[in-house]
Image (tube, rainbow, N blue to C red):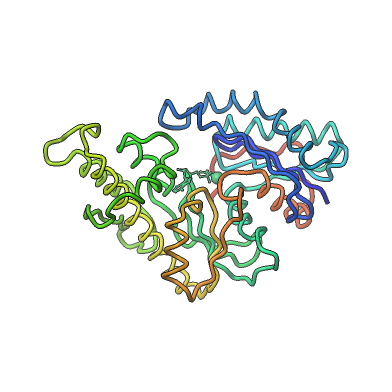
Amino acid sequence: MKVLGIESTCDETACALVCDGREILSNVVSSQINLHEQYGGVVPELACRRHIDVILPVLNECLKQAEVKKEEIDLIAVANGPGLIGALLIGLNTAKALALGLGKPLVGVNHVEAHLYAALMSRPEPVQFPCLGVVLSGGHTTLLKIETLGRYTLISETVDDAIGEAFDKAAKILDLPYPGGPRIEALAKEGNPLRYPLKPGRVKGQPLHFSFSGLKTGVLYAARGQNGQAVQEMRAQDKADLAASFQRVALKDIFDKTVAAAELTGCHTLVFGGGVTHNRALRALFETESPHLQCLWPGPGLSLDNGAMIAGLGYHKFLENGAASLDLDAITRIPF
Ligand code: KG4
Ligand code: ZN
């Protein structure tokens, strides 16, 4: 079954063609980083306009690379949430128009669930459930027990910023361009991670929940120093040390709570998803410090927002629940 996946939840416009939930025929992503960089973050209105401009060219490129004609598509899967409402509507309406015009079934996919599916579709053999799902993205920091595909029990989440957002905000404080995650990771390689005594966030009475706003404030105070200096006055080595210290504390916090959640739920396999899983230091931490846990990571091109994970999961949703109606709504927040 050839499934077209459409993703436009935030600042990536993406289409992919995937066979039977697993075999990727094409995976085309148009990133808007250059557009938003000058504002230090995603500007929703600009994101929507760019989605409109590029969605059809991205779709055509996706079909061309897969060597598939529109008429040969069997199912259209679209990320209908969570995300920015205007951005979601561009992908959703494109998907509906295609479904109506081609007479093909439509299915809606939860973008966050698809981030976890990205790691599952990257493996040659099926995984043994239950597993612990670890979503680390710009919008989510969530631990959930995956009972089986489509059945989840929420274990914990962030009470304020998401981990990717924390990376982006720390980068902004250090005067690094958007998106901050890769910039912090690169700068941290040059720095001393033990230089600044930053503290991980604790949530009273909820030991597995996350909080990153205090850590971000810690970075701000450390950057200003005792004299309240401007960040531009920081020595390059101090900046690198602060980036390294922030990354160490943030990643260790995720590591500790994830390992504790794995113990609590009796899960021996961790399924990672979301843009922050691109971070090599995160992967190295889990691979070296928790050898008793099996770690499943998204394959190349599947960490950041992409259409392949939407098409992959859409295939299973269709087999399980059938097609959605053309009334399918965009949903900005979807609780687990
Ligand atoms: O999953 P994603 O593409 O979009 C959302 O659904 O949010 O994640 C984007 C987030 C951004 O906050 C970005 O800074 C972060 O992932 N990110 C990273 C890295 N690459 C991307 N964070 C840390 N280290 C990285 N190498
Ligand atoms: Zn995402």
Residue 77 visible in the picture: no
Left or right? Give the position of 197 relative to 51: left
Residue 214's x, y, as percent? 28, 48
Residue 130 visible in the picture: yes
Left or right? Give the position of 308 relative to 282: right
Residue 118's x, y, as percent? 62, 54
Q: Quadrant of residue 77?
A: top right
Residue at image position (39%, 63%) is 208
Q: Quadrant of residue 223?
A: top left
Q: Which quarter of the image is occupied by the C terminus?
A: bottom right
Up-down: is 137 above or below 296? above
Residue at image position (61%, 52%) is 300
Residue 152's x, y, as percent? 58, 61
Could you tell me how many numbered marks the image carries?
0
Which residue extends farthest left?
227
Q: Quadrant of residue 236?
A: top left
Question: In front: 72, or 336?
Answer: 72
Question: In front: 207, or 298?
Answer: 298
Residue at image position (55%, 34%) is 11
Left or right? Give the position of 102 relative to 23: right
Up-down: is 116 above or below 178? below
Up-down: is 273 above or below 259? above
Question: In front: 219, or 331?
Answer: 219
Residue 303's x, y, as percent? 56, 50
Residue at image position (30%, 59%) is 204
